Image: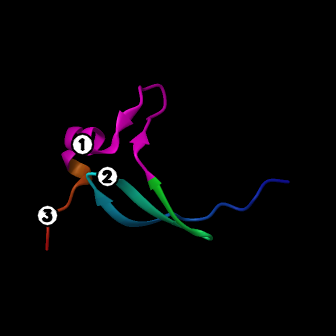
Amino acid sequence: MSAPATSLILLGATREGLDIATGDGVLRLIEVQRAGGRRLAVLDYLNARPELRRPAA
């Protein structure tokens, strides 16, 4: 039996990484990898995907 799917809550995105809320605290992703792609630093990934960024308030 697999665990039920849960939604992810993005707490923040900085030069240091993406902060994701977990049941036990916060997980910081410092690298990401799309399916079939190569591993990238979060900053490089976000710089290459402007549609994922939103303007500062």
Circle 2 sits on which residue?
A: 16
The answer to whether 38 appears left or right of 2 in the picture is: left
Query: How far is disc 2 from disc 3 in space, using C-alphas?
Result: 18 Å
The answer to whether 45 appears left or right of 3 in the picture is: left
As rendered, which of 49 and 13 lies closer to the eye?
A: 13
Per the image, label 2 sits on a secondary structure element best described as loop
Q: Earlier in the sequence, mark 1 or mark 2?
A: 2
Position of residue 24 relative to residue 31, above or below, is below
Q: Position of residue 29 (x, y in %)?
A: 44, 50
Circle 1 sits on which residue?
A: 49
- Residue farthest toward the right in the current orientation of the protein: 1
Q: Amino acid at mark 2?
A: Glu
Per the image, label 1 sits on a secondary structure element best described as loop
Neighbor class of circle 1 (other Cα within 10 Å; few <14, some 14-19, many 20+) is: few
- Please tell me the numbered disc located at residue 6: none
| Point 14% across, 63% down: residue | 55
| Highlighted range, magenta | 29-50
Circle 3 sits on which residue?
A: 55
Q: Amino acid at mark 3?
A: Pro
| Point 19% across, 47% down: residue | 50
The answer to whether 27 appears left or right of 2 in the picture is: left
Which quadrant: the N terminus? bottom right
Q: Is residue 40 magenta?
A: yes
Q: Position of residue 53 (x, y in %)?
A: 22, 55
